[in-house]
Image (tube, rainbow, N blue to C red):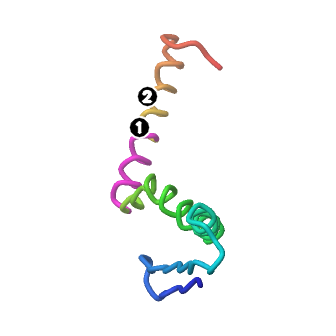
Amino acid sequence: MLKDYGGTSMAKTVIEVKKNSNENNSSVLRRFSRRIQESGIIRKIKGARYNARKESKLKIKKSALRRIERRKEIEKLRKLGKMASK
């Protein structure tokens, strides 16, 4: 049984596997592992490990200004002949 208690970004998913009367432990474990894999829980967790925070507007503006200043500096050096043209 797969239950999803959603609503938030950290939703809890409960996966239940009940052992049948003629089933051994390894097959129950295999069935549980397959359910986990099909639900995509592990993929979400592994993907969330590398999520970066969104950059603030101020940081984006500052980096844009640095780029503009750097381009002006390079253009100035090219005009003076201190840097090779493209």
- Tell me the residue at 65%/20% (across/down): 86
How would you classify the magenta stretch by its main secondary structure?
helix
Find residue 3 and report its horizontal and vertical position in percent.
54, 86
Amino acid type shown at disc 1 = Glu
Query: Which span is picked out in magenta?
Result: 57-67
Vertical position of residue 6 compared to residue 27: above or below: below
Look at the image and say whether residue 41 sits in the magenta stretch.
no
Please report contact status of discs 2 and 1: CB closer than 8 Å, yes or no.
yes
Q: Relative to the observer, which residue lies in front, 57 or 65?
A: 57
In the rendered structure, the answer to whether residue 78 lies left or right of residue 35 reads left
Q: Residue furthest front?
A: 22
Quadrant in which residue 11 is drawn: bottom left
Amino acid type shown at disc 2 = Glu
Name the element at disc 2: helix
Vertical position of residue 68 compared to residue 70: above or below: below
Find residue 58 and report its horizontal and vertical position in percent.
33, 59
Circle 2 packing at 10 Å, graded few (<14), some (14-19), many (20+), is: few
Which residue in the protein does label 1 denote? 69
Circle 1 packing at 10 Å, graded few (<14), some (14-19), many (20+), is: few
Which residue in the protein does label 2 denote? 73
- Tell me the residue at 49%/80% (across/down): 14
Q: Relative to the observer, which residue lies in front, 34 or 76?
A: 34
* Picture quarter with the N terminus: bottom right
Find residue 79 and report its horizontal and vertical position in percent.
53, 19
In the rendered structure, the answer to whether residue 32 lies left or right of residue 74 reads right
